Image (cartoon, rainbow, N blue to C red):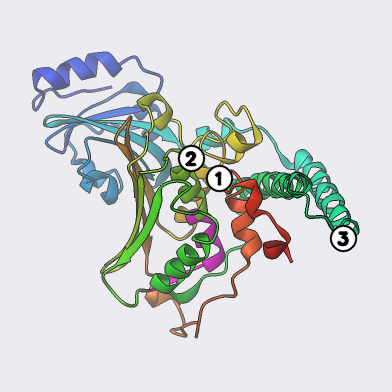
Amino acid sequence: MRHSEYYMTKTAAKLKTLFSLSAQPVIGTERDRIVFANQAVYTILKKDLTGQHIKDVLSGHIVNETAESFVSSGHLEGMPITVSVARFGSVTVYSIVPQNEISLMSPPIAPFVTSLRSSAFIIRLAADQITEKIESDDDRLNAYISSLYRSYFSILRLTVNLDTSERLSTGTLEFNPRMYDVAALISDLMSSLSHFILPDEGAAMVFSCKSSHVLAVVDSDRLEQLLLNLLSNSINHTSKGDRISVALHDDDDNIIISIDDTGSGVSTDVLGNVFARYTQPHTLSDMTGELGLGLSIARGIAELHGGALIIESRPGEGTSVRVMIPKNMDTNSGIREPGLPERDISGILREMSGVIRSEHYSKRYLD
């Protein structure tokens, strides 16, 4: 394997030495020119990248990102990857995990889904029967019933996320894109969430968009699933007094959805694995949330739309997530959906079951 050191500074030379024996593919650049690519990169691509411009081999949204450190989905010469990026002055290091290796990390889940879903519906049936047969103003009894309903939605979320994750990996996930006003979709979702995520219980959530209408071709159900997974993650890492800002930007051929929070942030070691499924889950909430499936599903849905996901985070400073999705206006018939899809409140109760308080799981919202 040939490595030219013509462009290489002392910093880049040290990084080359550090990563030369790494089993993980690593590319290093000096002012956007590739100054080293280790043996693992050569094994994948069967060629030496030294001297090439990084934008010629890596997705543009990764190369153009200005954050000092972040994780993103993308492509390396057309191959789906997850990449962790760190900048050291004029030197940038790209640590790469091919998508097929991420899939290998994941155990088979199909045998568990049916049994879990059956257990969930038994819990739901029991809660319904208790509610119908007992008319009580006993706050303690009502709290128990609400906990049963919340448990039902928590298990249901796990089964939905397991199934979604499996179908994303096999390319069989149902996907029905239509032309929507995405600004209206997100505004409606945030309004519905405000009934369950109250400002006096945690972080304040706000939505902003400079344009009154932002048209794009999206699957409204999948986009909602993506956003709820990301918002659930932010809520888990924030507390009262923090802020979660959701913004929609119209960027010519793309829409960019950003979710920024002022919470606890994510440590570097965790950030590097956020797209891996089932990373050390300890509870059902962990399995469906930030340690398990949530972010890998958000990434998969973004890519299903032809887009990408970028995550930047620092412990104690919060987390910033950007979802970039092509508008794809030229691939649509031009027929815009006349209004918003009917809101299924059970979807919010399911997807946010890890952060919505038990007392909100009442018959008021379940009927």
Question: Residue beneath label 2, please?
Answer: 236
Q: Residue at 47% x, 55% y: name it.
A: 227
Q: Amino acid at mark 2?
A: Asn
Question: Residue beneath label 1, please?
Answer: 355
Image vertical order of residue 42 relative to residue 298, above or below: above
Tag 1 near tag 2, CB within 8 Å? yes
Work out whether residue 49 or residue 327 is closer to the camera in this orientation and state it.
327
Tell me if I can see residue 151 in this picture.
yes
C-alpha separation, residue under disc 2 versus residue under disc 3? 33 Å
Tell me if I can see residue 255 in this picture.
no
Quadrant containing the N terminus in the rendered view: top left
Residue 109: where, in percent of width, then height? 71, 38
Residue 260: where, in percent of width, then height? 33, 48
Image vertical order of residue 186 relative to residue 160, above or below: below
**Dot 2 alpha-carbon crowd within 10 angstroms: few under 14, some 14 to 19, many 20 or more:** some
Mark in the foreground, 1 or 3 = 3
Give the mark, 2 or 3, whose residue is nearer the N terminus: 3
Q: Amino acid at mark 3?
A: Glu
Work out whether residue 324 or residue 34 is closer to the camera in this orientation and state it.
324
In magenta, the rendered stretch is: 215-227
Work out whether residue 296 or residue 227 is closer to the camera in this orientation and state it.
227
Magenta-colored segment: predominant secondary structure: helix
The secondary structure type at the circle numbered 2 is: helix
On residue 132, the disc is: 3
Residue 137: where, in percent of width, then height? 78, 55
